[in-house]
Image (spheres, coloured by chain):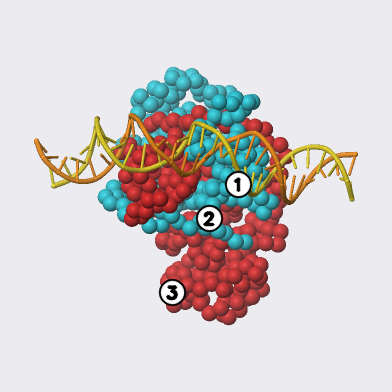
Chain colours: A cyan, B red, C orange, D yellow
Amino acid sequence: MNDGPYKSSAKSVTARALAVLAAFDVETPLLTLSQLARKAGLPVATVYRLAGELEDGRFLDRDNAGRYGLGVRLWEMGLLTPVHGRLRETAMPFLLNLQYECRETVQLAVCDGTNAIYIEKLTSETSVPIQSRIGARIPLHATGIGKALLAFSSDDFTEAILAMPLTQFTPETISDRRVLLRQLAQIRQRGYSVSHQEYSLGSSSLAAPVMVNGSVQAAIGIVSYELRTDLTQYAPALLGAAKSLAQRLEDAVGVAYPSIKDVPPDPAAAAEPLRGAS
Amino acid sequence: MNDGPYKSSAKSVTARALAVLAAFDVETPLLTLSQLARKAGLPVATVYRLAGELEDGRFLDRDNAGRYGLGVRLWEMGLLTPVHGRLRETAMPFLLNLQYECRETVQLAVCDGTNAIYIEKLTSETSVPIQSRIGARIPLHATGIGKALLAFSSDDFTEAILAMPLTQFTPETISDRRVLLRQLAQIRQRGYSVSHQEYSLGSSSLAAPVMVNGSVQAAIGIVSYELRTDLTQYAPALLGAAKSLAQRLEDAVGVAYPSIKDVPPDPAAAAEPLRGAS
DNA sequence: CATTTCTTTTCACTCAATGAAAAGAATCTT
DNA sequence: AAGATTCTTTTCATTGAGTGAAAAGAAATG
C-alpha cells in the first residue's frame, strides 16, 4: 500500500476506469495522457492501458493532437438515460411552445438527491444571459424551480432538506426555515413558485411542478431579468405547459419502460469497435 | 477458454464493464440483473459485481423495482462531450431562432465515420412527426443534411463514401454515384442542399453546412412535409443561421478548449460516491 | 405448496492487471 | 544543432484482484 502524495485510492479496475473518465470536467474537457494520469491519480502506464480500452469503446475520443476527451459513446448513452430519453424528449415540444409564447428563458429541472438538476434550458437572443448550465446542480431552496420541486415533495423529504444548512447565495436567498415553509405552503396553494434574485442577482423566475401520478417528476421554470416584465402574466401558459407535459408523461408510463419479460442474449455483445474517419 | 452458446468475448475487466453498459438500448433502457447478464453475455455473478461498482459511480441507477438503467453520471458526462458542450451549446440559440422564424423542424448534425449523427432536433406542434431520433446515425448520401456535410468534405473522404454501397431507403434515395456527384457540386455552388423524400417518404428538407476554418464542422437542416411549403423560401434564414453559428464557433476555438499547460493533481480523484435520495 | 427464476454471498484458483523501468518521440532551451 | 525535459509507448516479472461455479436466500409464478 503505497501512499505517495495524492497517489489515489481507486481499488478495483472498474473504479480506476471510472476515475479516468471522471478526470474530465467543464474546465478541462481535453487532456493529454500524462495530465489524465495526474488528474486521475494513477500511474501513466495504467492510464495508458485503460484509456486505450476506453477509446476502443469510444468512451474516449482523441483529437488530432492526440489529446483525450470524453467520447461520443458517452453522449449516446446519456441519451438513453431516463432524464433525457423519457423526460427531456417528451418535454421538449412543450418547452419550445412556452418559449415561443413568452420569449424568455425556459428551464426544465428534476430533483436528484438534495439538489435540482437542470435538464434543459432554452435561451434565445432576447433572454437573460449565462444562467445555470445544463447539468448544473443547485440546492432546492435557492431557486424558483427548486422551490417548485420542493413544495410538492413528500413531507419527510422536505424535512430532510430543511434539516440541512440553507446556503445563502444572495442577500435574497431564503435561509430562514419558517419563511421557506410558509412559501412552500403558498406555492402548493397557488400551483406555482416565484423567486426574486434568490440565486443570482438581477433575475427572477416563475416555476411550476410537473406532477405525474401524484408525485413531482420535474419542474418547468421561466426566467427573466428582474423587473423587466411581470412574469406572473405567464403563469397560465406555464401551468398549462406543466399540466400538458404531466399528462403526456402519465400516458407514456409503461410504454417507454415496459416490464420486458424476456430479453434475448445479445449476439452483438461482442460488437466491433466503430472507427471514425474525418 | 469456454465457448458455450453466446458466451461473450470481452476479455479485459474494463471491456466487460463497458459491455455491461452497452447492454442498454432504446428498446430496453431498463434491465434486471439477469437480463443484463444475458445481454452482456457474462456470468451473473460477474455482472452483479460490475453493476454494483458502476452503480456506486452512478453510471448505473436502479429504479424502485431494482432494475438497472443507465445512470445520471453518463448523462452528465455526455454534456462534457465536444458534440454537446461545444457544438450543441453554441448552436442552440441559432437553432431556436431559426425554428422561431420558419416554424418547421430544425436539425443539427455532424459527421461521424460514414454517417451523420443528429445532435439536436427541434420539433414543435406544427412540424413533421417522428423524424430521426437525436443520436441517430444515418448514411450521408440519404438525407439533405447528410449531403450538405458530404458536399463540403475533403475529396478523399467523399471518394471513400462513394466507394461504399449507397443504401436505398426510398425510391427517391440517390443511389447513382454520378447523380450524387453532380448534386454535391451543385450544393457546393448554391451553398445549401435540397432533398425530397430521399430518406423517408413524405418529407423534404433543406440543409446548409457550418464551415469553421475551412472544414465542415456540422450542418443545419430544416425539414417539412413534402409539398407543404416551398422550403427554399427559408434558404436565406438557414444560410444566415449557419453562417452565424460558424462565426461563433470560430471565435470560440481555443477558448472552450485551451491547451492547458499544467493540470494539478486532483485531490478529489478519490471522490465520495454520491448517493441520491427521493 | 411446490416450482421456477432471480438476487446475493462465498471461496479457492489463476490469469489478467499491474507499474517500474527503459526505449522511443516530441517539444522546449540555449 | 546538440542537450535537456517531458511525453508516449512497449516490455515483462510479480502477485493480488477478479473470476465464476455453486450454494443459499428471496421473490415471483402457477
Q: Amino acid at mark 2?
A: Ile
Q: Are marks 3 and 2 on the same chain?
A: yes
Label 3 secondary element:
loop
Residue B170: mark: 3
Comparing A271 with B23, the one in front is: A271
- Residue A23, position as x, y percentages in the image: 59, 38
Marks 2 and 1, how far apart at CA:
17 Å
| Mark 2 chain | B
Residue B119: mark: 2
In this rendering, is residue B18 above or below B110?
above
Comparing B179 with A109, the one in front is: B179
Give the quadrant of residue A191.
top left
Name which residue lies at 44% across and 77% down.
B171
Label 1 secondary element:
strand
Q: Amino acid at mark 1?
A: Gly
Left/right placement of residue C3 relative to residue B276 reads left
> Dot 1: within a 10 Å radius of its alpha carbon, few (fewer than 14), some, or many (20 or more) residues?
many
Residue A69: mark: 1
Marks 3 and 2, how far apart at CA:
23 Å
Q: Quadrant of the C terminus of chain B?
A: top left
Name which residue lies at 26% across and 50% down.
A261
> Dot 3: within a 10 Å radius of its alpha carbon, few (fewer than 14), some, or many (20 or more) residues?
few
